[in-house]
Amino acid sequence: MEGLLNFFAGLTTVFEQGLILAIMVMGIYLTYKILDFPDLSVDGSFPLGAFVLAAVVLKDINPILGMFIAFIAGALAGMATGAMHVRLNISNLLAGILTMSALYSVNSRVVGKANVYIPGDKTIFNLFSYDKLYILVIILVVCMFLKFLCDKALKDKRSFIISTCLYIILFIILMTYTVINKNVTLMIIADIVFIIKLCLDYLLNTKFGFALRAIGDNEDLVVGLGVNEKNMKMFGLMMANGLVALSGSLYGQYLKFADLQMGIGTMVIGLASIIIGQGVLKKDKIINNPSIVVIGAILYQFIIYIALRSNDWFKALYKALHFSDGAIKMLEIRTTDLKLITALIVVIILAFSGKKLKIIFKTKG
């Protein structure tokens, strides 16, 4: 019974980390699904956001401003990748790799060392105590109101009602959890993710957003319409890497440290989340793609959580089968196995869904 209670207690961490990584996944969604651009520079942009945030807050600057600066830093990294590709005619894959490699050195110089502690009292989670819950609630209610206005204009009556009911239910659940536990961490993260999702929804439904989508689908058509596809790609890469860095800055505050190695596998995690989300859900008038990738990020974290929690279950099984202590230790799942688990998740989903991954092996000149 105690194990079951601990399992459910850990689900809060799943939602918190899943939502933080959802910001990163939305950035990768822009490059992978919208621009059809295999941007590996995100592996460097993620820790860049954490290091920039650390450098800013250690100088006693507001962490919200620090997150904005982290977004700008990530956008500059995306601009570097875009400039190499569209101005210097370097292939998209190689441009991303070059930026990722350069960012490793840049990140180590931001604070002058490979890892740094971020004091908890200097993070955004310390800005809003439970006494300031009303501020977070007001922000969330305003975002929901804006979302309802957009949905009413874009969706039919049935889809609008269902979507509205789902958001209200999620709001009630979030409020109930926050009040019972007197913990606003999840509320803070939810507010940030909701704001970013609203901005992305708005962007993708503008004329500019439609042109951005068209570049990934048919670049020649966009060029024929007189649109500057080079500038569009640059903007898309800047926006994507900015979101990835923003996610990294929030993740660094959540973990209270920044490390050079924290960005390894960012692209794979993002792809896994997108594939899981789109494998479970399909875009329709009720749910759009940004919402799907957010759900995918949470589901990915849940799968990883199950994998790590399964150690106790497997240990009991191994002992029942009379495995030696050495064999049990060798077979246990460690945190260092997470990248392997992620890779296996992607392979299994792709193998069973029959979808082909148009990344890594596909490059455009």
Image: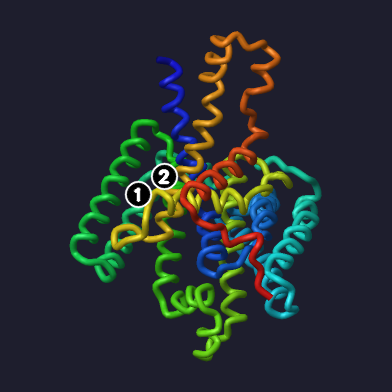
Query: Can you say whether 180 is above or below 89 in the image?
Result: above
Q: In which quarter of the image is the C terminus?
A: bottom right
Q: Can residue 122 be seen in this view?
A: no
Q: Quadrant of the N terminus?
A: top left
Q: Picture coordinates of residue 264 (x, y %)? A: 68, 47
At 48% from the left edge and 73% from the top edge, which residue is drawn?
Answer: 213
Label 2 sits on a secondary structure element that is: helix
In the picture, the disc for residue 44 is none
Q: Pointer 2 and pointer 1: residues touching (CB < 8 Å)?
A: yes
- Few, some or many C-alpha atoms within 10 Å of disc 1 (few <14, some 14-19, many ≥20)? some
Toward the viewer: 253 or 30?
Answer: 30
Looking at the picture, does residue 289 appear above or below residue 180? below
Residue 108 appears in the rendering? yes
Give the residue at mark 2.
Answer: 187
| Residue under pointer 1 | 137
Residue 301 placed where, x, y %? 51, 40
Within 10 Å of disc 2 (Cα), the crowding (few <14, some 14-19, many 20+) is many
Residue 364 is left or right of residue 128, and the answer is right
Q: How many marks?
A: 2
Residue type at tag 1: Val
Amino acid, disc 2 = Met
Query: Element type at marker 1?
Result: helix
Q: Please tell me which of labels 2 and 1 falls first in the chain.
A: 1
Counting from the top left corner in percent of width and height, residue 276 is at: 47, 48
Name which quarter of the figure residue 154 lies in: bottom left
Question: Residue 69 location, x and y as percent?
Answer: 62, 61
Disc 2/disc 1 C-alpha distance (Å): 8 Å
| Foreground residue among 160 and 91 | 91
Above or below, 175 relative to 273: above
The way the protein has been coloured in the rendering is rainbow
Q: Quadrant of residue 321?
A: top right
Instruction: Report the residue at 41% width, 60% height from top.
Output: 289
